[in-house]
Image (cartoon, rainbow, N blue to C red):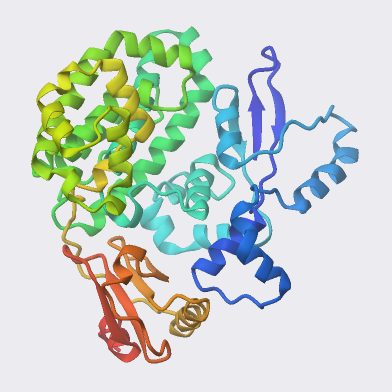
Amino acid sequence: MLWRDHAQFGNGHWSLTLYGVDPLAMYAWCSKHGLAIRSSKLTEYLDKHAAEGMSQAPALLYKIAKESFPVLRGKYCPTFEADCTWEEKSTLLRRRASPVYFEFWGSLGDYAREFICYPDVRERYMAYIDHHGFDWTHPSVAFPLIGNICGDIPFPDGIVRCSDAFNAGVKLGLHELLAKIADESEDEARKLSPLLQWSMLEATRVAIEMAEIYRTAKEVDEPPPPLSTALDKRASSTVELCEWAVRHLIGGNHPVHQRCFELGRWGAAFFSEWLDELERHAFLVAHADVLADSLRGMLVPILAKFQPFDIEPERTCALRGFFRRIEVDSADTLAAQSQQIRSISASDLLSAFRDHGASWLDEVVPAVLHTVGELPDMALDWGGMKESILKIFESGCRWPAIMLSQNGRYGVGMVDEPLRSLLVPVQDPNIEVYFLDQKAVASFWVKMTWSELQNRLSPST
């Protein structure tokens, strides 16, 4: 990534950041998803100890950086900065850097080029690629692409959970806030320029997935309004997208998800990790009571309706963590606290929600499920999927599975651990496998033979 550094006393220094895939993380991912790996003493060691190791940058990155110094010294004064993860680096750069240019090498380069050249990506998923003549080197294309590579995608599997609605509200709300502040004066716009560019890139990732849900869901009959980078439209276009998300993407039948989105939107300056502690504290002092009242109005009916302490503890770990934070540790305490929840201070309640996020709501509030239309036939790699299923089975898991998500994405994985005690293990992976169709409103795991599954997924063959 080539970026311009605005923090060097206004000198606008240029910097290069090299990224690579953590080999231990890649090994763990391949093992989980059944990719063939040749067994050895090293793989046996990694199976036992990989989770204990820290994330590592590939040695090739250091080699490239070291060998680039003689080339760069001719015109520049190169120095090393830091070795950290993509998430950590992004946090360091948001207030000081403007991403300008990206390039991908090796397997990641092959993936980037194939992704951008795919007709459905250019014509549907990121239609602005053809419209503006972009490719993988442009930040507006590279950031969603990196998110896809890392598995960091808004609305995973095309499903809108409480946590997804909240996180989308935070990202769009922060961009809306920064755009409005930047519109107030040229000086503010100059100070916020890098952060505003990063927030626009995040908002774009959210908008892409919202549009994808619109294309596949029958209930969402109005397309999302586009985001704009034009100075006179950047704030208003974000407002329009937020209003569309509440009315159409989520809909009036899901008030909890609507409140999660709105809470994230209006409290983005506090809930987002992008602002420093002083800025977040100042915002909290000014808006704590309004935000807390909204949160209380959402919590009281939820806690009264779902009786979370009646649910198995292993299914409500996040929920119970939030309860401990607000000093609720039993059903009796909850019954009393539900009536007196307004006694919790606004700052304490909001801080607890910020630290635990909305993921605990996912444990008790069903997701927003849409009716998905028929997907076109796809040329599936049955041989590759079967090989992955066999690898998962040989690794010790007796519940390997093929999964179809709401957004039409196929994958290979395993049945969720809490459900394995309820389901009969696969006896012969050459004959049968589990299948999860998340297009169905009431999705559940079904054990099928390979021929039954092939007939179901490829009805025209």
Above or below, 322 relative to 231: below
Above or below, 364 relative to 279: below
**Total label count?**
0
Name the residue: 57% across, 62% down: 28
Using the image as rendered, state which of residue 103 and residue 60 is in the foreground. Answer: 60
Q: Please provide percent x and percent y for residue 149.
A: 52, 54
Q: Please provide percent x and percent y for residue 30.
A: 56, 67
Residue 313 shows up from this direction: yes
Using the image as rendered, state which of residue 98 and residue 165 is in the foreground. Answer: 165
Name the residue: 32% across, 71% down: 420
Residue 227 shows up from this direction: no
Q: Quadrant of the N terminus?
A: top right
Looking at the image, residue 394 sits to the left or right of residue 55; the answer is left
Name the residue: 29% across, 48% down: 211
Above or below, 199 relative to 222: above
Q: Please provide percent x and percent y for residue 339.
A: 9, 25
Name the residue: 65% across, 51% down: 53
Q: Please provide percent x and percent y for residue 402.
A: 37, 74
Above or below, 121 relative to 141: below
**Quarter residue 430 falls in:** bottom left
